[in-house]
Amino acid sequence: MIRPLRHTAAALGAVSILAIAGCSGGNSANQPSEEGGDAGGGTLVIDTAFSIETADPGNSYDPTGNMVAKALYETLVDFDGADVTTPVPGLASWEQNEEATEFTFTLEDGRTFSDGTPVTADDVVFSLQRVQGMAEAKPNFLLTGVTIEKVDDMTVRFTTDAPLLQLPAILANPALGIVNADVVADNGGATDGSDSAQAYLDGASAGSGPYMLDTLDLSSQVVLAENPEYTGDESPAFERVVIRNVSESATQLINLSGGDTMVAMDLNGDQVADLDAGLSVETVPSGQTIFLLLNQSGDVADDLANVDLAEAVRYALDYEALLELAGAGATQATGVIPTGFEGALDAGVERDLDRARAALDAAGYDGQTLRLQFPNDYPVGGVEFTPLAERIQQQLAEIDLDVELAPAPFATELDAYVNGSESFGLWFWGPDYADSANFLPFAPGLKVGLRAGWEAEADPEMAELAAAATNATSIDERTSVLEEFAAAMQERGPFVPMIVPGRNIATSDEVTGAVYNAVWEMDIAEIAPAS
């Protein structure tokens, strides 16, 4: 029996750090351009530090790339504005069966691509099977284990062997935007792994979104033009959009204050705290979590491979003092599942030095020096890791826990983190799509758990909770399990969640609607002249 889908509760912020992407150089902010500075409904100018490799949605999995793909390509599923707690229909509405293994999507009548042709089930199947066929594409994993088939011209069925309650949230990812199958196939597109359409899609768009691609320069700027054949629900207010690569937040602020741009996406907490008159900011928690990792492998951490040490660290920290370094919009992490996500805990840990010292004794600590490894050149949500690590070091010294700081470039330290060779690490995690299933990898035996040397047999009960959440067939069932999982992780896991950084989007008072979204950074089509 198929019943209407009960939408998945998700999050206030998430994706988009998801892939660990670098920013390219080549600022264009100070180059004269006819596109700059006029918000009369003609051209919208946005400054951001680029993290984009292509305009091809099927190969894109970076923050700026997601924002561009959202403007060019519609997805089957959408979210309402900045709210990513409940998936809503995009190109299609859907139903699921009781086992959450079959999802049937029905396309909305009248939706068209930018060449005026209708969006059909053939386009959906081709678009998503194309992503499945490109084994090296970053978004490829999103549809692992999912079978996609056409039912009729307006209906597509998705089936899985195991329950996949998060499928609607997954399908809202801009990487799974629907392309015009005929156009893309004529330009190298394929579903069998031989696809070569990226070069074409980096010069032209083949979507049904509110905008079309005008020009793409990965080092300088992306220019979009309004799609005259758009038949969706949004009302794009600008004929052209120029997204400029401005890697320095200080330069973004100068451009915004001087009227050279209308939106600045990467200002830090200090910069937005005292904006000039005529400027405003939208500040929200990002959904990313900054945490400490205590390795449970004896080969890595020797005698200190135990969760008692993690408990000592957890209760020794002064979280309010740590938040002072995070700036506007940041909140304390209440657990491995950030606040706002299904199953998140209501409150975080409060400092308790007596409990911390007792746990340190139980851990067998005898004056050993812990080496805290962290990337020193990759701020997350405006949070610089070096001053954060220094404050952690100072706070742990209050329980006589000796910490040596070991900073390294991101590219160098990433290998140690991924390979599980850090005994004590400072890192961050952001989900790949807006659903709490993204945080189950912290469980023993799963991806992040194994990076902490935490095998499944180290805590079978915790591993069973993660499996139960994965295999849940209803939201109520899964929520209950996730709450139990989050509480158990906070009680005896090898991780110390600390900070959910804020995300700031600053604008001139000439425009409205520039709001951070966890999945696609910002919906460009929602930005309009204030007048």
Image (spheres, grey):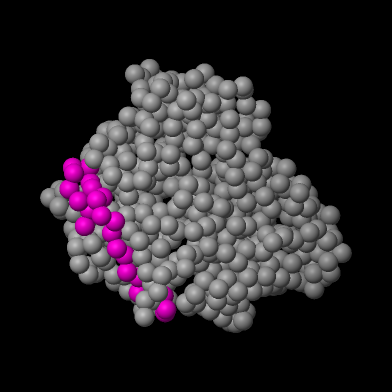
Please tell me whether residue 172 belongs to the stretch shown in magenta: no
Which residue lies at the image location 36% right of the left edge and 65% below the top edge? 94
Q: Please tell me whether residue 48 is drawn above or below residue 317 in the rendered image.
A: above
Q: Is residue 139 left or right of residue 415?
A: left
Residue 413 shows in the view: no
Q: Quadrant of residue 153?
A: bottom left
Q: Is residue 138 left or right of residue 484?
A: left
Q: Which residues are drawn in magenta? A: 98-120
Which residue lies at the image location 48% right of the left edge and 47% below the top edge? 81
Viewer-nearest residue: 397 or 183: 183
Residue 106 shows in the view: yes
Principal secondary structure, stretch drawn in magenta: loop
Q: Quadrant of residue 337?
A: bottom right
Which residue lies at the image location 87% right of the left edge and 64% below the top edge? 354
Q: Which image quarter is the N terminus in? A: bottom left
State the count of labels.
0
Rendering coords of residue 445 (x, y %): 53, 75
